[in-house]
Image (tube, grey):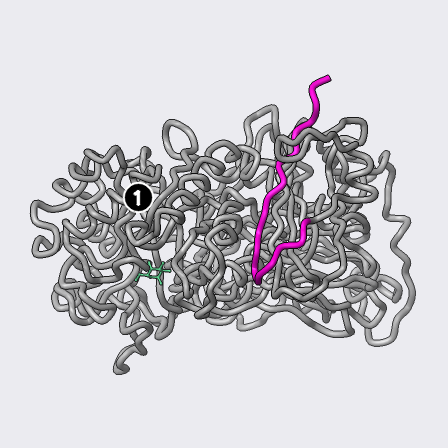
Amino acid sequence: MILHDEQAKLFTLHTRNTTYQMKVGQYGVLLHTYYGPRLRGGDLAYLIQYADRGFSPAPPEAGDGRTFSLDTVPQEYSASGVGDFRQPSIRAELADGSQVVDLRYAGCELRHGKYALDGMPAFYAGEGAADTLVIELEDPVSQLRVELLYGVLEEYDLITRAVRVVNGGSCSVRLLQVSSLCLDFQRADLDLIMFDGRHTMERCPSRAPLRPGVQGAGSVRGMSSHQHNPFVVLCEPGAGEDNGGCWGAMLLYSGGFQAEVERDQFDNSRLVMGIQPRQFCWTLEPGEAFTAPEAAMVYAHNGLTAMSRQLHRAIRERLIRPPQGGMRHPVLINSWEAAYYDFDTEKLVELARASAELGVDLFVLDDGWFGRRDSDRRGLGDWWVNEEKLPGGLEALAERIGELGMELGIWIEPEMVSEDSQLYRDHPDWVLAAPGRAPTRGRSQLVLDFSRKEVRDHIYESLRPVLSCPGLTYVKWDMNRSLTDVWSAALPPQRQGEVLHRYVLGVYELLERLRRDYSHILIEGCAGGGGRFDGGMLYYTPQIWCSDNTDAMDRLRIQYGTSFGYPACAVGAHVSAVPNEQTGRSVPLETRGVAAMSGTFGYEMDLGRCTEEEKEIVRRQIRAFRERRELLQTGDYYRLTSPFEAGPYTAWQQVSADRRQALVSVVTGAVRANAPFALLRLKGLDPDLDYRVNGGEELYPGDALMAAGYPLPSLPGDYQAFQLHLEAERG
Ligand code: GLA
């Protein structure tokens, strides 16, 4: 619900459990008054105090007044160059060379339904399910107009934001920064949680109290990156899974980003999130507009679990767009770790046959099927089938796979090119490369200039015959290097600062086109595993390969970190062979299955090599996943313990919406002799119901399971796993 009190110049956004408020203050400055638990209403501007603070200048309209300074008041969208020395939300260079942008309130508009962003990802909601508020600010001198867009998804406790900048003046303007979100707090007793890592170890949470000054992280790699994630949490210092106020902010963007929090001299804090300003410079001619990507905000008064669940539900139901016919969750076998580049039709069919016999639905042919791609040094860009490996092309393979009762999936990496490829020989100027410099290589490959339409069109045309193959229902869209040498042959020198963002828009455009023209195909995102695991990609690719690290014990950490912002149904997770490719560790098959089941589930190994006993385990795993898929992927998610803490086990739990069913997964670490008994306290159950565990005779009261716990069995050996399936007794 959006309330606009015209007299008080007050905007109050209510969701079911939260309230967000802004007010047009003195001199038309848009103040931020509140974001937190839902309030009855009222004007919260009383919270803002004014004083004459040294070195904090006042706007010219204040005359002799010295108590109003942009340096000290909480603002909705911080300007630059006019007395606020904290983090700006927008910076621009005007035609006269000045970098002053002074934003004042100019008007507003309320609309039913949720705004959409042309060519960019955004949460969606129908007329009755959301409202939009547009607040217009203007720099009176340059006539630069800033439209702040707010989407209120009341039932989801979600507020989205986006920013549109319009050059209403008569001279061109160079935008140096346009952030999507600015969130001021009149407090500094907050912890910042970010999700950091590296290739094969993504999204590990790091938490620290705010210290004076600027802290944060971002990506300058042209992708949201393995190293940092465009999702951050600010929370009260004592906040835990079940207590304390938590504010989550997510940028729906797959390129470089910046997320920074500044704790200022007076113990106020400001979070600013948006496109990475480094290497960004966008020229706006008179009348032109620039739109910054969407950011989403959630608040939960009762801890991190509740905050995560709000996001999970909103992403599942209002961001992810299932392929035609509804969301499918095929159990897949991926050829990568089983065959790498070394395969032919017979080998693949054998791999598929062994998998089909165990119940796998979908066979995904990973890298190596096209051009002269017999290693990662050549062939990218030549999207024609290598008929030496696959005589009769994909159609022949799809037919054989179809005979086994399976569907076919395929790997592509459309944004990249190998120098040893026909595409590069034909179009050497289609890569990102600065004049006179040989571009750096990443995984021996170069980056195609996706800011150019003709490049995207060519890739689309060359992928068409592949995607049109009957029986092909899945595509894995990969991206395997960071962007460097950012320069486009298609843009003039003064527009080179636009390349990185235009590249991301280009990726979105091609993805949207594939979605539209091949709407039955499920696209899985991937960037060397989880290098582009973000809300932006999820709008186009309902699931994302979470990490190239398939070691179950490491996956517990990666999936735990990922779960703070993203739902299990989006997390690509497979069982792979042991010793693990990335870590050399051997973890029992049961455990690998339990870890992969809290994701999209599949296998990445030669199932034909399994012993009969292992095959039986695989059959059981697939059956269990199918039976519990709904619960696993859409159930309320509870992190029961953290794999980053030195406890004897890691546990998590999914609970059905009616709380009649739950699945608890437990994975132990290195075994200790004569270990203490463990009682695991469960969460989210109905205290008034009694539960049966794994179909056993005994009934356990829900209140006791939560307050006192459930005794965990002691299992011999390292890295053991088990699941407890709880079902409420009918009654
Ligand atoms: C990336 C992906 C892997 C695999 C290889 C193929 O590393 O993350 O899953 O597809 O590329 O080259």
Note whether residue 93 is visible: no
| Rendering quarter of residue 210 | bottom right
Percent x, y for residue 701? 79, 32
Note whether residue 730 is visible: yes
Q: State the residue in front, 498 or 622.
A: 622
In which quadrant is the N terminus drawn? top right
Percent x, y for residue 689? 77, 27
Horizontal relation, residue 449 to residue 558: left or right? left
Q: State the residue in front, 138 or 232.
A: 232
Q: Which residue: 26% across, 50% down?
A: 365
Percent x, y for residue 61? 79, 60
**90 in the magenta segment:** no
**What stretch of residues is rendered in magenta?**
713-731
Q: Is residue 418 above or below residue 151?
A: below
The amino acid pointed to by label 1 is: Ser
Q: Residue furthest top?
A: 731
Horizontal relation, residue 124 to residue 267: left or right? left
Horizontal relation, residue 188 to residue 233: left or right? right
- Taking the image as four quarters, which one is ligand 1 found in? bottom left
Q: Is residue 467 above or below residue 553?
A: above
Percent x, y for residue 50? 90, 60
Q: Which residue: 23% across, 35% down?
A: 404
Q: State the residue in front, 161 or 336.
A: 336
Q: State the residue in front, 148 or 571.
A: 571
Ligand 1 neighbours mark 1 (CB distance < 8 Å): no
In which quadrant is the C terminus drawn? top right
Q: Residues within 10 Å of mark 1 (few under 14, many from 20)?
A: many
**715 in the magenta segment:** yes
Q: Which residue: 40% across, 46% down?
A: 602
User: What residue is pinned by disc 1?
Assistant: 355
**Is label 1 in a helix, a strand or a loop?**
helix
